[in-house]
Image: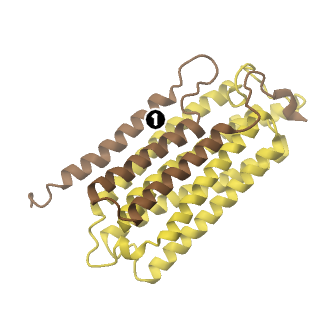
Chain colours: A yellow, B brown
């Protein structure tokens, strides 16, 4: 993948700001054969990532009542905090969508603007989550305390790691957009990072429902 | 500017992102409803669980169809193969979670 991207970059500079286009009639992210393959490949990745989360959810659902006399979700979860996390992530999914929308219209600076807003919302989400974890740990609700908390930190932490990785990835794409503008290659990257971002929102909806809402029920 | 050459010819977006705005509003509504159901204790536990899970499933449809271009093909006229791929993923998700709950419901009987 690295080699291919590198070749494309060279080609891009060498041929006078031209990226080789296989299918000019298609949406810009699908205009190279490579791009179309990578987008389908990324859907396959999302399906496997979904199965990873399915395993963690199944574990959590089985262990959620196994608190070993320790703190329960009802005592630990703070409604305003997890509601704020949810609203922030939903909004960032929307702004990420707007980045894709502007990409299709060819407005580079607006794409960059929406991606920066999306990444900042992602950062504030991660900040809230880290804060939540630290507070829980200080109250004695650590990962080692009970099976419920082991499952909780693994599930929510895995999602948080995905969001953190997404922020780094998005930052890289913002830099490439500054350097290269909207080409079929950067367009494909914007499209895929937003698929990833919307997918993380899908996973969060279930975290919100099954972990937090059912936890405080 | 490099981007001008490659501006898509066949893919015209409307001038206002209605689809995204509607999706965003729907996702907010589908977050507020379960939150209200849980905090105001309007339902007994079983209908409440079903209700909030139903909202979560609708929320996923909003993300997939309004934001993720789930049913959009690559422009070649071929089917959108991702619908098959991700449907299998969702099938396994439901089976993993459902089967885990089912098998563990015997844990008190099988020692």
**Residue A90 percent across, percent down from the top left:** 58, 53
Q: Which of B24 and B9 is in front in this view?
A: B24
Residue at image coords 71%, 25% = A31
x and y percent of residue A135 in the render? 49, 79
| Residue that sits furthest to the front in the current view | B42
**Residue beneath disc 1:** B86
Q: Where residue A119 sits: x, y (%)?
A: 68, 56
Could you tell me residue A132's position as x and y percent?
A: 51, 73
What chain does badge 1 belong to? Answer: B
What residue do we see at 83% from left, 32% from top?
A12
Instruction: Please identify the quarter of the rendering in which residue A7 is found.
Output: top right
- Tell me, yes or no, if residue A200 can be seen here: no
Task: Examine the rendered structure and indicate whether residue A96 appears above or below residue A164.
Answer: above
Left-right relation of B50 to A189: left
Residue at the (63%, 53%) spot, across then down: A92
Is the C terminus of chain A in the top left, top right, bottom left or bottom right quadrant? bottom left
Secondary element at image label 1: helix
Q: Quadrant of residue A71?
A: bottom left
Left or right: B107 in relation to A61? left
- Would you call the spot at circle 1 few (<14 residues within 10 Å), some (14-19), or many (20 or more)? some
Question: Which corner quadrant holds the N terminus of chain A?
Answer: top right
């Amino acid at each position: 993948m690295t080699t291919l991207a590198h070749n494309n970059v060279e080609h891009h500079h060498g041929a006078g700001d031209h990226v080789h286009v296989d299918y000019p009639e298609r949406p810009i992210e699908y205009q190279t054969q490579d791009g179309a393959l990578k987008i389908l490949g990324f859907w396959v990745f999302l399906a496997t990532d979904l199965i990873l989360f399915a395993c963690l959810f199944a574990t959590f659902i089985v262990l959620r009542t196994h608190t070993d006399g320790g703190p329960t979700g009802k005592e630990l979860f703070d409604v305003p905090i997890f509601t704020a996390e949810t609203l922030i992530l939903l909004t960032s999914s929307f702004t990420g969508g707007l980045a894709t929308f502007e990409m299709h219209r060819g407005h580079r600076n607006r794409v960059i603007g929406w991606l920066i807003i999306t990444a900042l919302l992602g950062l504030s989400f991660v900040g809230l989550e880290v804060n939540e974890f630290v507070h829980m740990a200080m109250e004695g609700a650590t990962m080692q305390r009970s099976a419920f908390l082991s499952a909780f930190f693994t599930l929510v932490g895995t999602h948080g790691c995905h969001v953190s990785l997404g922020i780094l990835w998005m930052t890289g794409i913002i830099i490439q957009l500054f350097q290269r503008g909207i080409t079929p290659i950067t367009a494909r990257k914007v499209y895929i990072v937003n698929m990833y971002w919307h997918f993380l929102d899908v996973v969060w909806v279930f975290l919100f429902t099954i972990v937090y809402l059912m936890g405080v029920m | 500017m490099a981007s001008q050459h490659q501006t898509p010819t066949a893919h015209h977006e409307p001038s206002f992102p209605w689809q995204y705005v509607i999706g965003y509003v729907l996702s907010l509504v589908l977050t507020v409803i379960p939150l209200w159901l849980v905090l105001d204790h309007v339902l007994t536990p079983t209908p409440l669980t079903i209700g909030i899970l139903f909202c979560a499933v609708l929320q996923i449809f909003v993300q997939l169809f309004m934001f993720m271009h789930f049913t959009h093909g690559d422009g070649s006229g071929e089917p959108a193969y991702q619908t098959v791929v991700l449907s299998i993923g969702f099938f396994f998700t439901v089976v993993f979670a459902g089967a885990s709950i089912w098998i563990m419901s015997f844990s008190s009987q099988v020692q």
